[in-house]
Amino acid sequence: MDKLIIQGGAELRGEIWISGSKNAALPILFAALLTERRVKIANLPHLHDVTTTIELLGALGVTVSIDEKMHLAVETQTLTAVTAPYELVKTMRASILVLGPLLARYGEANVSFPGGCAIGSRPVDLHLKGLQAMGAEIEVDQGYIKARSAGRLKGAHILMDTVSVGATENLMMAAALAEGTTVIENAAREPEIVDLANCMNTWGAKVCGAGSNTLTIQGVEKMLGGDYKVMPDRIETGTYLAAAAATGGRVKVTKTDPSALEAVLLKLKEAGAVITQGDDWIELDMQGRRPTAVNLKTAPYPGFPTDMQAQLTAVNAVSQGCGRVTETIFENRLMQVQELNRMGANIAVEGNTAVVTGVDELKGAPVMASDLRASAALVIAGLVASGETVVDRIYHIDRGYECIEEKLQQLGAKIRRVPN
Ligand code: EPZ
């Protein structure tokens, strides 16, 4: 397994561009299954999870090709299977998003039951309950979710017990080809949901209300083809801005969308950052100052995103003062704390809150990545720490950050990847 070796101490300075959003790209790739016509998808990030999704589409017999502009063309007329195999699903939980589109288009789908992961048990009960409300027959047999629908799915009125990004996406896609209208209340409002809805509507679906907590989807007989460009990655954006804040630097990120991460920008301003922005760029300048610790509590959009919690914990670790970071979405998403404390951080965990007392200096150390965003927090800590930090198991990072070492090198970081 590759490692990242970081010599800390440099203030990040410079400009980088932001890649397409992982969490928008994955559902959009699965949405291609809804139409028999050819679709083209642009601005896909070159990430392990995207490769895995393309592999999964291939395993279903879907034809995928990449053109000279790295746009992905998807044609589903060659589909030969409706089973998402364990070998692929076990590496990427988001494979569950194949369920809704396959069921809606072909009336059947078998998906290996996605296990939990480091951050939590990650149940899929809301996905299954919603599909059953639309008339699907679902059984779990030998570790597989087996879903069938006799004829078209039927539009339904669904009230989600919990706000769930994935369940909202799965049910929105299933409803696109259902007979009649589906209303999803207490829907997730994340920008990635809006991007998926915009993409599906470009391809002929009729989704209204994306971005609000009530979605109305009018089922259509068939969807069309078309082209779509994936939105920028708001979490990658926030991660590099957090790294700039932790190192007291000045960084400009381009090809991004400031409107998708307001809660993060507000917290970074609270931490003392001077932030300027345009339509597709953000500049963060710490003016050489050390950040001030902030309190935050994760919440569904437009609240502070759980995917930025570990990164702000790392910023707090080297800030002036004490900040309380409360994780409310996942039951086990404070794992970066132990590794940060091994680097000299002073963080106590009280239930789902990390009480972070900033220290003047972190010390480089060998650390181990556990999940995607905790790994990003360790990289941020390594950039600030004195001495050398070796981050092991960085396949976690490669799932969500395109060319992380090249982008950080472009900002003046002393970081390199070594194969294990
Ligand atoms: C999506 O995961 C993202 N992944 C996650 O990003 C993100 O952290 C999460 O949304 C929350 O914003 C992708 O988009 C591929 P949820 P998802 O369903 O859909 C509970 C990253 O780092 N729940 O919104 O799996 C669940 O346990 C990843 O990029 C149920 O109880 O998250 C959690 O407590 C990590 N039953 C809460 O809802 C269900 O059927 C929110 O989960 C589904 C979810």
Image (spheres, rainbow, N blue to C red):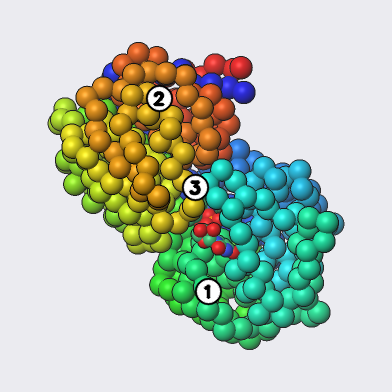
Q: Which residue is mark 2?
A: 342
User: Is residue 350 toward the left or the right of residue 44 in the image?
Assistant: left
Task: Please name whichever residue, 223 or 187, is drawn nearer the observer in this view of the structure.
Answer: 187
Q: Which residue is mark 1?
A: 160
The relative height of residue 381 versus residue 266 in the rendered view (above or below) is above
User: Is residue 80 toward the left or the right of residue 350 in the image?
Assistant: right
Q: Which residue is mark 3?
A: 332
Decide if ligand 1 comes within 8 Å of the CB at mark 1. no
| Residue name at image x 23 percent, y 51 percent | 266
Where is the N terminus found, in terms of image quarters?
top right
- Residue 198: x and y in percent read 49, 65
Q: Residues within 10 Å of mark 1 (few under 14, many from 20)?
A: some
Task: Please name whichever residue, 267 or 250, is drawn nearer the observer in this view of the structure.
Answer: 267
Marks 1 and 3, how far apart at CA: 22 Å
Query: What is the secondary structure assignment of the residue under circle 2?
Result: helix
- Residue 28: x and y in percent read 58, 57
| Residue name at image x 76 percent, y 48 percent | 86
Where is the C terminus found, in terms of image quarters?
top right
**What label does residue 364 carry, if any?**
none
Which mark is first along the chain, 3 or 1? 1
Query: What is the secondary structure assignment of the residue under circle 1?
Result: loop
- Residue 153: x and y in percent read 71, 79
- Residue 339: x and y in percent read 43, 29
Which mark is first along the chain, 2 or 3? 3
Q: Residues within 10 Å of mark 2 (few under 14, many from 20)?
A: some
Q: Are marks 1 and 3 in contact (CB under 8 Å)?
A: no
Marks 3 and 2, how far apart at CA: 19 Å
Q: In this view of the protein, can residue 102 be seen by the observer?
A: yes
Q: Residue furthest top?
A: 387
Decide if ligand 1 comes within 8 Å of the CB at mark 2. no
Q: Amino acid at mark 1?
A: Met
